[in-house]
Amino acid sequence: MYNRRKFIKISSLSASLTALSASAIAKSALKIQPTNYPIVISTWDFGVAANKEAWKTLEQGGRSLDAVEAGVKIPEADLHNHSVGRAGYPDRDGHVTLDACIMDELGNCGSVAALENIAHPISVARLVMEKTPHVMLVGDGALQFALEQGFKKEDLLTPESKKAWQEWLKTAKYKPVINIENLPGGKYNHDTIGMLAIDAKGNISGACTTSGMAFKLRGRVGDSPIIGAGLYVDNEVGGATSTGVGEEVIRNVGSFLVVELMRQGYSPRDACKEAVRRIIKKKPETAKQIQVGFLAINKNGEYGAYAIQKDFTYAVCDKKSHDLVNKSESFY
């Protein structure tokens, strides 16, 4: 006779089999395919030059950590890029402050925020990771550490950036503009380069660096130097990085969320889409006025992206092509 006890046993067995099946699917989705290695991806069109520099390390069998550091140093040094590094636009008080973080395949990470007078914050972030017991140093403390490590103190406010700041002071109106780095006359006004690489051994590392939003409040820090927000890497699963208005990424711990979704079996593109969807769900009216984009890669070397607004682009460099630029899908 079919009784309640048998029903409970059957239901429990069914639930267990379902859980095992889901687990098997997730593991299958993350099965390693070494032929996709090495590969490096990064945010925006200016990621092409950064990727090519990272590839020099990867094609020689070098470590992904070395590749991403070398790669993002290219836009950090670019005097025509006003969103990253030494030519970044200042805050509303005229101070150029830089944020960066880096993370390796072992889960080690380092970060600097509101760093002034140092042209390559990504390299300082790496030394925070390797030479201190800390994850993040900020402001004057980050500068002191950098100088102790032999970095040169420089005035980062270039004549071009100073002129733009003085022009902004005439109205002193602060409002992030969607994809302003891609607009004629406003190229590279603000944004970030986030980079993810898998080396020939299948190990994943990531880096993220920015001068933050132009003419921000002094002391403002976005998502870029925050592990789990602007960047996250799990060598068993994959990595993710973000771009756009960092406040919304921080509120949702965006890059960590993307990686955890990939752990559950989501594709990189679908994981990015879900992270975007959650931002929109929490603040639908705000989301209509801003840009946030996520870029991710899984352990297979499969990559994908998704953004709130259209026109978010990302660069890809692998054995087949060194200068591929893809346009991300978007919600709007």
Image (cartoon, rainbow, N blue to C red):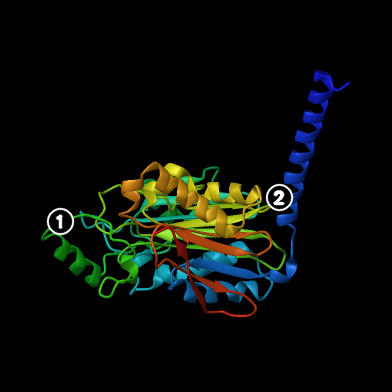
Q: CA distance from mark 2 to mark 1?
A: 50 Å
What residue sits right under mark 1 in the picture? Answer: 172
Q: Farthest residue toward the left? A: 170
Mark 1 surroundings: few (<14), some (14-19) or many (≥20) residues within 10 A: few
Q: Between residues 2 and 294, which one lies in front from this camera angle?
A: 2
Residue at the (40%, 71%) spot, across then down: 77
Q: Position of residue 253 (x, y in %)?
A: 48, 44
**Which mark identifies residue 26?**
2
User: What residue type is disc 1 on?
Assistant: Ala
Give percent across and percent down for residue 76: 41, 67
Residue 102 visible in rendering: no
Q: Which callout, 2 or 1, points at the residue further toward the start of the chain?
A: 2
In the rendered image, the quadrant that contains the N terminus is top right
Q: Say which quarter of the image contains residue 235.
A: bottom right
Q: Position of residue 125 (x, y in %)?
A: 48, 54
**44 in relation to 100, above or below:** below
Element type where label 1 sits in the image: loop
Which residue: 45% across, 44% down?
A: 252
Q: Is residue 61 above or below residue 111?
A: below
Q: Which mark is residue 314?
A: none
Residue ranking furthest to the front: 1
Classify 264 as above or below 191.
Answer: above
Q: Is residue 236 left or right of residue 311?
A: right
Q: Position of residue 329 (x, y in %)?
A: 47, 64
The residue closer to the viewer here, 286 or 260, is 286
Q: Which circle, 2 or 1, is nearer the viewer? A: 2
Which amino acid type is marked by label 2? Ala
